[in-house]
Image: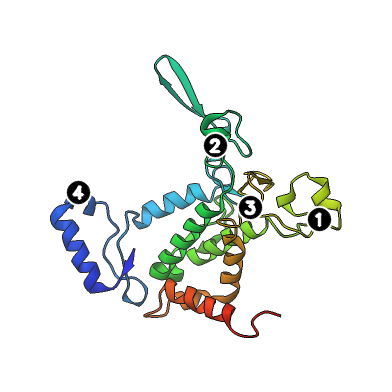
Amino acid sequence: MLTKLPRFVERAKWYQDNRPDLMANLNPSRPGIAGRRMLSLLTDDKLRRVLARMLDPAEFLSDHGVRSLSRYHLEHPYVFNAGGAEYRVGYLPAESDTGMFGGNSNWRGPVWAPINALFIRALLQMYSFYGDEFRVECPTGSGQYMTLFQVAEELSNRLASLFLLNHEGRRPVFGGARKFIDDPHWKNNILFYEYFHGDNGAGLGASHQTGWTAIIPALMGFFARVRPEQFLTPGVSLADLKREQQRIIDAPGAHP
């Protein structure tokens, strides 16, 4: 949570007086870019540890976004014993293999647009505090380091790749559905699926989920119009940038 100094001091004092146990684990109150302050449970070290797991292709990071469950659990399922019965939660990149929760598996492996959008927003908020000095390895193990803005943009690009033609001239969202892949009447009609295969990006669940999945083209438009330096400008918030983007979209002549 980013806030201006007076409000930050007021809130920090309340926590110090009422929940000193929580304050002991909070990010230090040092100023960030443009004198901003951040109240966060993630210290610099904890943030790096979280992102190291989130950006690891062997765990959460797929070619098409962040998975809802680590791929580690494909071979190492979580096992829980209760009442003489054994229960398991394993990585399921596609549809569920049980009838649990109505056969819904979107929280056990597939890529889910709203969760990715929350990650992207959090990364942009933190970038406006840390700036360009704070960099993390992305993907983990690649030797390539990025700012938090660049990581957010990378996640957005991976989500966008679900719908774009790849090097084989195919859209991952269509999976192995030949009708959508080859038929000229269908191949450019993109469906907004509910969630996506955690390994190959194929669309799963409801095929007209224009509620939360529509955030992907919105993110594409957002990153096409904003620049990292805009986040570092004193007095400019993420909400300000979103309003400016909407103003551009709504302007006369903005669409051909």
Looking at the image, tell me whether mark 4 or mark 3 is earlier in sequence order: 4
Q: Residues within 10 Å of mark 1 (few under 14, many from 20)?
A: few
Residue for badge 1: 186
Q: Which is nearer the eye, 59 or 85?
A: 85
What residue type is disc 2 on? Tyr
Q: Position of residue 128 (x, y in %)?
A: 41, 70
Residue for badge 2: 72
Marks 4, 1: nearer the viewer: 1
Looking at the image, tell me whether mark 4 or mark 1 is earlier in sequence order: 4
Residue for badge 4: 21
Mark 1–mark 3 Cα distance, whole angstroms, equals: 22 Å
Looking at the image, tell me whether mark 4 or mark 2 is earlier in sequence order: 4
Residue 25 appears left or right of 44: left
Looking at the image, tell me whether mark 3 or mark 2 is earlier in sequence order: 3
Residue for badge 3: 64
Looking at the image, tell me whether mark 1 or mark 3 is earlier in sequence order: 3
